[in-house]
Amino acid sequence: MTSYLPRNQSLDSADLVVVGAGIVGLAHAVDAVRRGLSVAVIERDERATGASVRNFGHGCFTAQDGDALRYAMAARTGWLRLAKESGFWLRDSGTVVVARAEDEHAVLEEFHAVRDDQVVLLDAAEVAGRMPVGPGVVGGAWLPMDVRVDPREAPHAIAGWLAARGVRFHWATTVHTVEPGLVSTSRGQVRAGRVVMAVGHDVDRHFPELAEQAGLRRCALHMLRVRDPHGQKIAPAVLTGFSLLRYDGFGACPTLPALRTRLKSEHPDLLDAGLNLMFTQRPDGDLTIGDTHAYATTLEPFNADELDRHVLVEAGRLLGVESLTVRERWRGVYASAPEPFLIATPMPGVRVVSVTSGVGMTTALGLAPEVLDDLLR
């Protein structure tokens, strides 16, 4: 016989209740623990399964701009510290941006002029010395501040580190309602001094009017794990000319519009698919490659095989091989909106926090302290 807890039965209480155990929610829990607060985390699944584990594991700090750059540089320190404390895999090996045309290299030269010591220009031979590449490389850049983690390991390791420090996790628990000082769940009520709603693209499930006002949609990514065709260690993350169109840090480069026009003319199907051609190497040697971008409030449930083919063909050209062996395919989903961050106060003592630009792993550990500074003030 199954017994059920009444929804009004007390489940827990804490100074800070975090809803969502993805990297944004975990970042707020980490900062709260460092402040000496009691923390409870409520997560609808048995473990984090969303965007926080389906990404490249790329701390893409240098290519950000504005608030995202400030958060990212603070997050870099947070990642290095947490990796030492939690013991998860991290490589402080930077990013290589491969230029396969002169206009791509021109953008990197302009970026170097703005960021100086954060960008090291490379010639074609220096690029080839850092990673295997196909023909046509004219040069590139190394962004030494960037890091890599294993996204399938790091969030779970951080949750374990938090649990060891007294954070109570309520897994497989659905939040029904939120009000000042109280979170009602499928397992009972949680008393809360403050609440952070870190539910990613599901803001509209809890606060639909807020999501509509912010223009929040879902972004679906096609990503793949493939066998490394060269069987060699690739220390940095790898970006390409397509990536220059997708990160705000490159937006101020004067020659970027001409690059966009050229890529649109030569590869209209790839730009229509929102291709950000890049990859990272996993600890086991396989490569995570991707990715394409499609936007909707409600995503179609069907995955178009054409998008996977685009990623595989272009990644093969980048690596100088005719074909790649696929081990896994998946769809990532993250929140997207015109502004890169959604931080809102729907009621006293409650903050809704969503990274709406696909850089949650990159920025969350720097964003959370500023949110809590305001929330706890």
Image: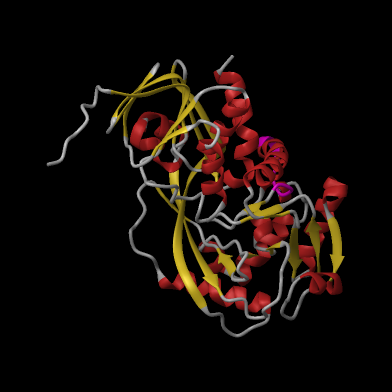
Q: How is the image coloured?
A: secondary structure
Q: Residue at x 45, y 47 (%)?
A: 48
Question: Which of the pair 107/202 is nearer the observer?
Answer: 202
Q: Residue at x 49, y 43 (%)?
A: 22
Percent x, y for residue 238? 69, 64
Q: Is residue 203 above or below residue 316?
A: above
62 inside magenta stretch: yes
Percent x, y for residue 74? 71, 36
Q: Which quadrant, please, contains the N terminus?
A: top left
Residue 46 as seen in the image, left or right of residue 99: left
Question: Which of the pair 14/309 is nearer the observer?
Answer: 14
Question: Which of the pair 366/81 is nearer the observer?
Answer: 81
Q: Which quadrant, please, contains the C terminus?
A: top right
Q: Is residue 331 above or below residue 75?
A: below
145 inside magenta stretch: no
Q: Residue at x 57, y 27 (%)?
A: 32
> Which residues are the magenta region?
61-67
Asked whether residue 138 appears in the rendered view, the answer is no
Percent x, y for residue 247? 66, 51
Q: Is residue 234 above or below residue 184?
A: below
